[in-house]
C-alpha cells in the first residue's frame, strides 16, 4: 500500500476521497504532490473496491491555490517543458479514468488547482469557491492543460479573457459559464458529491466508462467521435449488464449490474 506525505485517502462505500493535505500552503501543488496524485489516481484505476473518486483540499480556504511558486521560480527553458508535461500526463490520467471523478472545490482553485478541477469529470463548488488562471501575473501561462480545458469548457472568448487578465471568478459565475455543475453551501459540499457519485454508481459501470471515453473523444482531433460512440454502443450490447438492464426494465425491477 502506497504511503503519502501530501495526500489523505479515505475509501468509504466505494468512493475514494483524495484530499490535498497542505493546508499551510493553501494546498499548493509541488512536484511531490503531483507524483502522489498519480499514484492515487492509479489506485482508482486498479482497485476494484473503488467505484468513484472525489478530489478536495484540506481546510476551508483552498481546494488548491496553485502550483508551488518556489519550484516554478527555479525553472529554466530546459526543464520547464518536462515540468509541464509531467503535470499534463497526471491530469490526463484523471480525465481518462473510466470511473467517475468529481472535484469538490472548497475555496480557491487557482492555477494548477483550477487545472486539476477541470481535469475531473465534474466540478461541485462551495459558495466561497474562486476560480482562475492567474499565471500571467508570474510571466508564464497555464502549463497543466489549462489553456486547452478551459477553452473547451467555457469557450474561446471568455477563456482568453480569464487567462490574459488573470482575473478570478466566483462559484456562481463559474456555474453560469459551465465551468461548475453545482454550487452548494460549504458544509454540503462532500454530501452533494457523494450524492452524485452514488447515483452514477447505481448505473452500469461499463456504460459509465464508455460515456467518459466517448465524451473525451469529442476533443481528440485524431479520433472520429461518432465511430467511437458506435463501437462503444456495440460493446455495451455484448455485455451482461445490457442483458440485465433491459430485462430489469421489462420486468419492472431494479437492475443489479456487475460491470461485465
Image (cartoon, rainbow, N blue to C red):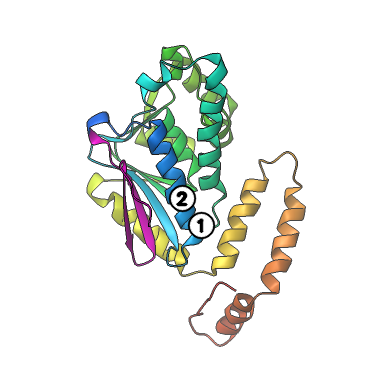
Q: Residues within 10 Å of mark 1 (few under 14, many from 20)?
A: some
Evaluate whether residue 244 shows in this view.
Answer: yes
Disc number for residue 41: 2
Q: Examine the rendered structure and indicate whether residue 170 appears above or below residue 240.
A: above
Q: Give x and y (percent) for residue 80.
A: 53, 21
- The answer to whether 109 is drawn above or below residue 205 in the figure is above
**Badge 1 is on which residue?**
45
Magenta-colored stretch includes residue 68: no
Snapshot quadrant of residue 33: top left
Q: Position of residue 111 (x, y in %)?
A: 42, 27
Q: Is residue 166 above or below residue 242?
A: above
Q: Residues within 10 Å of mark 2 (few under 14, many from 20)?
A: many
What are the residue bounds of the magenta stretch? 1-23
The residues tagged by marks 2 and 1 sit, at their Cα atoms, a distance apart of 7 Å
Relative to residue 173, is residue 260 depicted above or below? Answer: below
Q: Secondary structure at mark 2?
A: helix
Say which residue appears at 58% left-offset and 35% top-offset.
152
In the figure, residue 7 lies in which quadrant? top left
Q: Quadrant of the C terminus?
A: bottom right
Q: CB under 8 Å between callouts 2 and 1?
A: yes
Q: Which residue is rendered at x = 51% and y = 41% of the image?
A: 90
Amino acid at each position: 500500500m502506497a504511503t503519502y506525505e501530501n495526500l489523505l485517502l479515505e475509501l468509504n462505500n466505494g468512493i475514494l476521497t483524495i484530499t490535498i493535505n497542505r493546508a499551510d500552503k493553501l494546498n499548493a501543488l509541488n512536484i511531490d504532490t503531483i507524483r502522489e496524485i498519480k499514484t492515487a489516481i492509479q489506485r482508482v484505476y486498479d482497485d476494484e473496491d473503488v467505484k468513484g473518486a472525489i478530489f478536495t483540499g484540506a481546510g476551508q480556504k483552498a481546494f488548491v491555490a496553485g502550483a508551488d511558486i518556489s519550484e516554478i521560480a527555479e525553472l529554466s527553458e530546459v526543464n520547464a517543458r518536462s515540468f509541464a508535461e509531467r503535470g499534463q500526463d497526471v491530469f490526463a490520467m484523471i480525465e481518462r479514468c473510466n470511473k467517475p471523478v468529481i472535484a469538490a472545490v472548497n475555496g480557491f482553485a487557482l492555477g494548477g488547482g483550477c487545472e486539476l478541477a477541470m481535469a475531473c469529470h465534474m466540478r461541485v463548488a462551495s459558495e466561497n469557491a474562486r476560480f482562475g488562471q492567474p499565471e500571467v501575473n508570474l510571466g508564464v501561462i497555464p502549463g497543466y492543460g489549462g489553456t486547452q480545458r478551459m477553452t473547451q469548457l467555457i469557450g474561446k472568448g471568455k477563456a482568453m479573457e480569464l487567462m490574459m487578465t488573470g482575473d478570478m471568478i466566483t462559484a456562481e459565475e463559474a456555474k453560469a459559464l459551465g465551468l461548475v455543475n453545482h454550487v452548494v453551501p460549504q458544509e454540503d459540499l462532500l454530501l452533494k458529491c457523494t450524492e452524485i457519485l452514488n447515483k452514477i454508481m447505481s448505473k452500469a459501470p461499463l456504460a459509465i466508462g464508455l460515456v467518459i471515453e466517448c465524451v473525451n473523444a469529442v476533443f481528440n482531433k485524431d479520433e472520429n467521435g461518432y465511430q467511437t460512440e458506435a463501437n462503444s454502443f456495440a460493446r455495451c450490447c455484448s455485455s451482461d449488464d445490457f442483458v440485465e438492464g433491459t430485462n430489469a426494465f421489462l420486468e419492472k425491477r431494479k437492475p443489479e449490474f456487475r460491470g461485465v
